[in-house]
Image (spheres, rainbow, N blue to C red):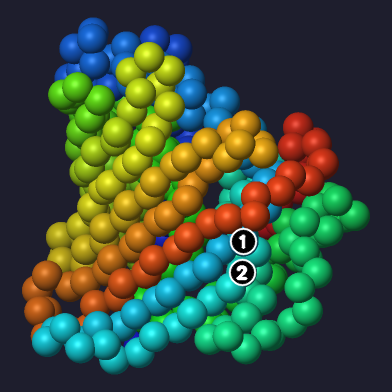
Amino acid sequence: MTRPRILWTLAAAAIAVSALPGVQAQGTDPAVAAVVERAGRYVTEYVDAFSAIVSDELQEQRLVRANGTVKQVRRLNSDFLLVKTGASVWPAAFHDVIAVDGKPVRNREDRLRKLFIDNPKTAVNLARAIASESGRYNIGIQRVGNSPLLPLVFLTPRIAPRVQFTISGSTVTFQEVKSPSVLSRTTGGKRFDMMSSGSFEIDPNTGRVLAAVFTAEEPLDRLSAKYTARYEIDPKLGLSVPTEATEHYWRADKPKDDRLEVRSTYSGFRKFQVSTAEQIKVPH
């Protein structure tokens, strides 16, 4: 039996949606729209700045039984990298595992960074092979494209018109209302929407996102996911960076099943100089 996968990626149809400048989010009043538009501009500029930055990711994955006892723990040390490829509106996430449960699986050589510096035209092929290799160390449900920047996609000009927003102080809540959803589940070769809802903590003056939380559910099998992320200014880069992200996965209709809990922290942010404007070829 094929295991279902959570795709932490933009749906192809969602990417194709081109929101015109000034188009408001669903049912949003002008005051809320102004904050969302400001946050959208911030996210667009931020993602451009954050692409081509490598960081150290420390991740702990736990499979937890229904009674609360821990069934299995996996600790991964990885290089984490986001890079825009081709005409993509959102950067691709790459993980390169260095150590598993404290045991090195390769030498620490900044392999991903070197790929994009030395071989930018073929780097995506090689990086995806590395990411696929690294993915085999995960436990629990298969996850593809998980990134601490994922929550920000709901604020982008291409996706915001498909989302309903409300605001209270610095908290902006949202509900995804149009298919195809940003998140999806695939099983048996079929794709199923996982509509999301959550909230952001946003500086209303600058649009800078301080924190985010959202949940998503696929109603057919009641597969649910929850994601949180926090962002702080890195004084060396002068840029807001993700510091912590959590993921939770469970089946609401099967309370006796194991649930997966993941906590990731990020540090050691460093830039590398490759032109993300260069059309890095995406393999077909």
The residue drawn where x is 24% and y is 38% is 199
Do the CB atoms of the residues marked 2 and 1 lie less than 8 Å apart?
yes
The residue drawn where x is 12% and y is 70% is 252
Numbered mark located on residue 106 in the image = none
Q: Nearer the viewer, residue 124 or 174?
A: 174
- Percent of width and height locating residue 137: 53, 82
Residue that label 1 marks: 56
Which quadrant would residue 91 be assigned to in this image?
top right
Report whether 186 appears left or right of 133.
left
Which quadrant would residue 226 be assigned to in this image?
bottom left
Above-or-below relation of 30 to 55? above
Label 2 and label 1: CA atoms lie apart by: 6 Å
Which quadrant would residue 1 be assigned to in this image?
bottom left
Of marks 2 and 1, which one's residue comes earlier in the chain?
1
Q: For the C terminus, which image quadrant?
A: bottom right
Report whether 221 appears left or right of 274.
left
Residue that label 2 marks: 78
Report whether 219 appears left or right of 266.
left
- Percent of width and height locating residue 9: 46, 52
